[in-house]
Amino acid sequence: MTSTDETEARRKVRLSPEVRREQIIRQATRLISGSGFNAVSLADVGEACGIRKQSVLHYFPSMNQLLLAVLEHRDAQDFVTAGEEPMPEPTPAAARQYFTRIFERNINQREIIRLYYILGAEALSPTHPAHDYFTQRSRQATAELEMALAWKADPGVAAVELLAFWQGLEIEWLRNPDLDPLAVWAAFCHRFFA
Amino acid sequence: MTSTDETEARRKVRLSPEVRREQIIRQATRLISGSGFNAVSLADVGEACGIRKQSVLHYFPSMNQLLLAVLEHRDAQDFVTAGEEPMPEPTPAAARQYFTRIFERNINQREIIRLYYILGAEALSPTHPAHDYFTQRSRQATAELEMALAWKADPGVAAVELLAFWQGLEIEWLRNPDLDPLAVWAAFCHRFFA
DNA sequence: CCAGAACTTTACCACTCGGTAGATAGCGGG
DNA sequence: CCCGCTATCTACCGAGTGGTAAAGTTCTGG
């Protein structure tokens, strides 16, 4: 993609910093969730926004910082949409309802699931810029699950079990969009929350 | 890493084609499983083997071909080690024993699990050189599981359920090496195969 | 209506990428 | 012993990378 001036020179469009920043983050999210951080360049992000890579660097000091901004932006948005979710009482029925609701919300955000899948894999490497982010996040998720599964015989094992199935199912759903994740989820829950 | 001549010039070591090819595939597997295909270069592979990147290209016509060679080599090796595994009868006990044996074998190959995790994520993108490989492989795995779970009420759903938990657990184990995957596996099987 | 702030640009830089062409050197067979 | 085969090398290419410096252009407040 040389993307030379095709039939028209680029019009210089000036946007407010807030709008531009959000646009950059949105496009970066889209591109990274599509091909992974290692396969996306500053120029790609710029092109998707209709600006040069140097303009992207005007808002984010480096590519790594942009990646972290993408993740933080996502966390902030999650906090908004999920904010009012009550912590479940430690009973099977309450926990099942709680996790099912979050699961349903997730599968309406295909791009985000894909982002975390791809980045989570890349970030296994300790030198990846998002390595620490994912390490901390995984620890936190396990702890939260363990608390909601206190009624289980072994909450520690149960937490890993639920977490493993959960994200494994999301991955299968990414690979095969035709599959009905809620049906599989229900089959698992029928045995797990009993 | 400029890797200049440190205290000693490089000795030109000449190996037989078979030995060198295998060495290259082995090192490429190691590097890719560590950081992903998109983050490994021909020069990295060459350096790991003590040769120049051009010498790597002497054996594999391109980086993409090297990646495919890595995957094919792995499949061939799997066929050797797993060759004598009998297809299970479609009963709960036989299926449980069958899958448990494969699972135990897998968790002795951390690097390979990691290779498939990282590559599987990158290969979601249709432009990735291993995209077709993973699409076909996933289809095949689901079909095989479905056959071994014919005794289930809904083998299609059960196959996805088992596959999801399976690979989700492997991923959790990659993230946290301290966890005991066999314990979690047993907990899941206790309910799933009943 | 002008001046300054700042958004976007062009012009670079040093480096790495995958890949090609041709020279060099180590090994086995005669 | 040396000659041919070929594994490996040096040298190079065009394109792309993240990032810096500074000029230009657009908007806005006084």
Image (cartoon, coloured by chain):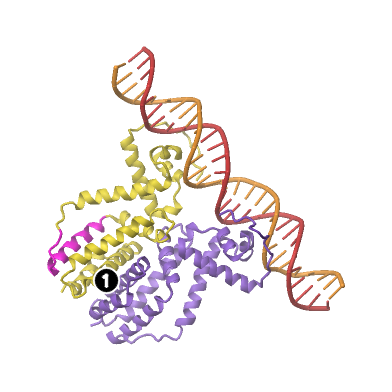
Chain colours: A yellow, B purple, C red, D orange
The quadrant in which residue B159 appears is bottom left
Q: Secondary structure at mark 1?
A: helix
Magenta stretch: give its range: A87-108
- Residue A103 sits inside the magenta stretch: yes
Side of D5 where B76 appears, left or right: left
Q: Nearer the viewer, residue B13 or A169?
A: B13
Residue kind at label 1, given as amino acid type:
Glu
Residue drawn at x 41%, y 48% as measured from the top left: A64
Q: Chain letter of disc 1?
A: A
Is B142 placed left or right of B5 in the picture?
left
**Residue B66, quarter of picture:** bottom right
Residue corresponding to mark 1: A161
What x and y, as percent, mark residue B139? 38, 70
From what the image shows, is residue B37 above or below residue B88?
Answer: above
x then y, percent, for residue A94:
13, 65
Q: Where is residue B171, by image quadrant?
A: bottom left
Q: Quadrant of the C terminus of chain A?
A: bottom left
Q: Residue furthest front?
A: B7
Q: Main secondary structure of the magenta part?
A: helix
Residue at x 32%, y 54% (from the top left corner): A111
**Looking at the image, is B15 positioned above or below residue C15?**
below
What count of labels does the image hold?
Answer: 1
Q: Position of residue C29 (x, y in %)?
A: 78, 78
Residue B118 colored magenta?
no
Assess disc 1: are there few (<14), some (14-19) or many (≥20) residues with their C-alpha within 10 Å of its C-alpha. many
Q: Is residue B28 left or right of residue A155?
A: right
In this picture, is D6 found above or below A77?
Answer: below
